[in-house]
Structure formats: structure tokens, C-alpha cells
Image (cartoon, helix red, strand yellow):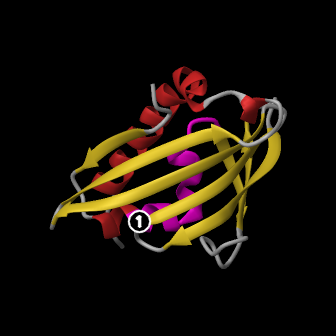
Amino acid sequence: MEPEVGRDMHKDAESVWEVLADGWFYPLWVVGATHMRDVDADWPAVGSRLHHSVGVWPFQLRDHTEVLDVDPGRRLELLARAWPAGTAHVRLTLQARGPDSCHVRMWEAAADRPWRWIPDWAQAPAVRPRNAECLSRLADIAEHRRHV
């Protein structure tokens, strides 16, 4: 089983990218992120960070997510921290499928020892359901948000 999930979205890739490029949307589509404290002004440039909390109030922990690589409109790679669980390498890719649709793929794997030594196929049962929900939320935002 692969740790990557995909979803067709009924919105063009540019509109989906706009959601990813606005760091303030992060806790709305990422399962586990609960409170956004700050977004670096140059988000989503390589090295920029989102400063968020994870967990349920009052047991929230302050953490951050950092951009590892970006190809604007096509790919975003993140190092997502979720202490005490560790960090995860996350890759989102967008592929246009027509004027009003695109396909988004999300891959995630543990980035810290000892978890990163676990093969992707063994991590998949834990990350696939969460990431499928992330893509569902991302689709809802992209497909239904109104531009001001």
C-alpha cells in the first residue's frame, strides 16, 4: 500500500494553489492543526514557516511547518512538525485536468528517527485516512470559497 492519496477537485489548479499559498487556511484543511498563530510574509517560499498549534484545547502545543521545496502552482513540499510525534515530510502535487478541474496528490512519510526507518508501505495505513480527509477539506475550501 502506498502512503500517497489523490483526489479530483472540481476547481482549476490555480484556485487550489491559492488555498495552499494562503497559510492562514492551513488549520482548515490539515487534520490536527488547530490554531494558526502567524504566517511568514514570504509563504510559501523555501524556508518560510507557518506557526501553528496542534492538539485540542487546552492541550495544544505550539509548532511550525516549513517549506522544503516549491514549484508554484504545481508542487509544495513541507516539513510538518507535530511534537511529540516528530516531523513528517509532506508533498502535495497539482495536475490540471481541464479548465475547471485538477487532480491533487498528497504523500507523507515520517522524517525523524526511528520512524523514518519504517517503510512507506508500513506507514501508509496510518497516514492515508488522515491525508484523504485533508484533501477532502482542501477540496471543500477551493470549490466553495468566494473571492472577495
Give x and y (percent) for residue 144: 29, 53
Q: Residue at x 51, y 43 (%)?
A: 107
How many residues crowd around disc 1 within 10 Å: few (fewer than 14), some, or many (20 or more)?
some
Q: Residue at x 40, y 48 (%)?
A: 105
> Pointer 1: what residue?
17
Against 121, residue 78 (above or below) is below
Of residue 62 and residue 3, the one placed in the foreground of this image is 3
Against 26, residue 42 (above or below) is below
Whether residue 53 sits left or right of residue 84 in the image: it is: left
Q: Is residue 20 magenta?
A: yes
Quadrant including the N terminus: top left
Label 1: which secondary element: helix
Q: Residue at x 53, y 20 (%)?
A: 125
Q: Main secondary structure of the magenta part?
A: helix
Quadrant including the C terminus: bottom left
Of residue 129 and residue 11, the one placed in the foreground of this image is 129
Q: Residue at x 31, y 42 (%)?
A: 7
Q: Which residues are magenta?
A: 17-32
Give x and y (percent) for residue 92: 48, 54
Q: How many marks?
A: 1
State the image quarter where residue 94 is shown.
Answer: bottom left
Whether residue 18 sits left or right of residue 84 in the image: it is: left
Against 115, residue 36 (above or below) is below
Of residue 134 and residue 91, the one placed in the foreground of this image is 91
Q: Is residue 131 magenta?
A: no
State the image quarter where residue 111 is shown.
Answer: top right
For the residue marked with disc 1, what is the amino acid?
A: Trp
Give x and y (percent) for residue 146: 31, 63
Whether residue 8 sits left or right of residue 109 in the image: it is: left
Give x and y (percent) for residue 61: 82, 39
